[in-house]
Every structure is written in C-alpha cells, then in structure tokens.
Amino acid sequence: MMEEFLEVVDRDGRIISIAPRSIIHGNPSMLHKVVHVLVFNSKGELLLQKRASHKDVAPGKWDTSVGGHIMPGEDILTAAKREMLEELGIVSENLHFLYTYIHSNNYESELVYTYCTVHEGPFSFNKNEIEEIAFWKIEKMQQLLNFDFFSDNFKYEFLRYLSIYGFMPFWFNNSLKELTGSPLFSGDPNFLKNF
C-alpha cells in the first residue's frame, strides 16, 4: 500500500510543505489538516465509531462520527464528503460548517475543520477501520467523559461542541433548514476561525 502524503500547514492553514504521514504522525511540531463530521439523528443523538484495534491512534476507543486527513490540494468540504462515504457509506448534501481549532498532543498536531449533518442511516461502515458504530445520547457521553471510553481527540471535540452549541436545541428539530441563514452555518470554514 502506498504511503499517504499530507500537507504541513501553519495555524491559518497555509501550506508549508508536504510530508509522508509516517513522518507527520509522531511529530507534534508538524501541523496537518483534518476534517470531522458530527452525524446526529433527529432525536439529537450523536453517532460515534469505535476505532479498530489495529489503528495507530486511539485503538479500540469511541471516536467522532467521521474523521480523516485532508489530502494535498483537496477542498475541505470535498474531504468531508469523501470521508463520510469511505467511513460510513453515506452521501450527505446537508453538511454545515461548525468551527475550526487546533488540537495537539504528544503524538500529533491537527488543524481540525468540523462539520455537522443529520442522517438516520442506514450506514455501511468500513469494517477495516471501524469495529462498530452507535448513536449516543449527549447526556450519556457527558457521564462517561472521565472514563477510558473515548479517544482524546473526541473528548476535545465533544467539549468544544458543548461549549459553543450545547445550549442550542436545534438538533431536536426535524431539519436544519431554518438555520441555514445564520452566519454560524455559512458553510465557510474560515468563519469563526479558532473561535
């Protein structure tokens, strides 16, 4: 299998260089772009994936609905749609941009672009990458945050989501259409840059 190459970027997403994944992972000084999609159902539950036990990052942990690297030259929204298809086997046209942030640990540093969508399934997830998927109630995830169920990346993502949107019950409506006029849902990943 050919090695994946990724863009090394600055805090604003400007390309500094391109390097192999094997060099970037394990070197937190090399910031690279990733995309996340939070997939909710109409009851307001969040879909999580349990990472395969052979993964190099957070094996066997519950993680964000969809997450993956943005390929060199790839548009962020295109990457989000590609990852949704690769990981969950779904196509969604109602992706809404939420926020961007930098997440760093002693293994890697990521410039994360997060979108959300509502999808009820069915899902055909990638069994090479994912052990299982399940919808979780927000309250249940909050109760388990201090235990060893979730990836560190997801904990950071979830707390960020709650801090910005936790008070807004918009997932409990049957669509996002009423929100699309809001600047928070402009679809522009530069809006709310590092909010």
Image: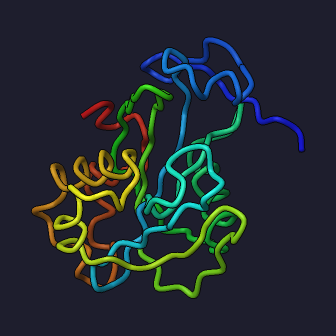
The residue at 28%/54% (across/down) is: 158
Residue 63: x %, y % from top left: 44, 59
- The image quadrant where one finds the C terminus is top left
Q: Residue furthest right?
A: 1
Q: Residue 85 occupies which quadrant of the picture?
A: bottom right
Q: Residue 2 occupies which quadrant of the picture?
A: top right
Q: Is residue 173 left or right of residue 108?
A: left
The residue at 61%/42% (across/down) is: 69
Q: Residue 162 occupies which quadrant of the picture?
A: bottom left
Q: Is residue 69 left or right of residue 120?
A: right
Residue 147: x %, y % from top left: 25, 59
Q: Is residue 40 left or right of residue 178?
A: right
The image shows residue 131, relative to residue 193, as above or below, that is below
Residue 33: x %, y % from top left: 54, 33
Q: Residue furthest left?
A: 167
The image shows residue 141, relative to residue 81, as above or below, that is below
Q: Which one is in front, 48 or 188?
A: 48
- The image quadrant where one finds the N terminus is top right
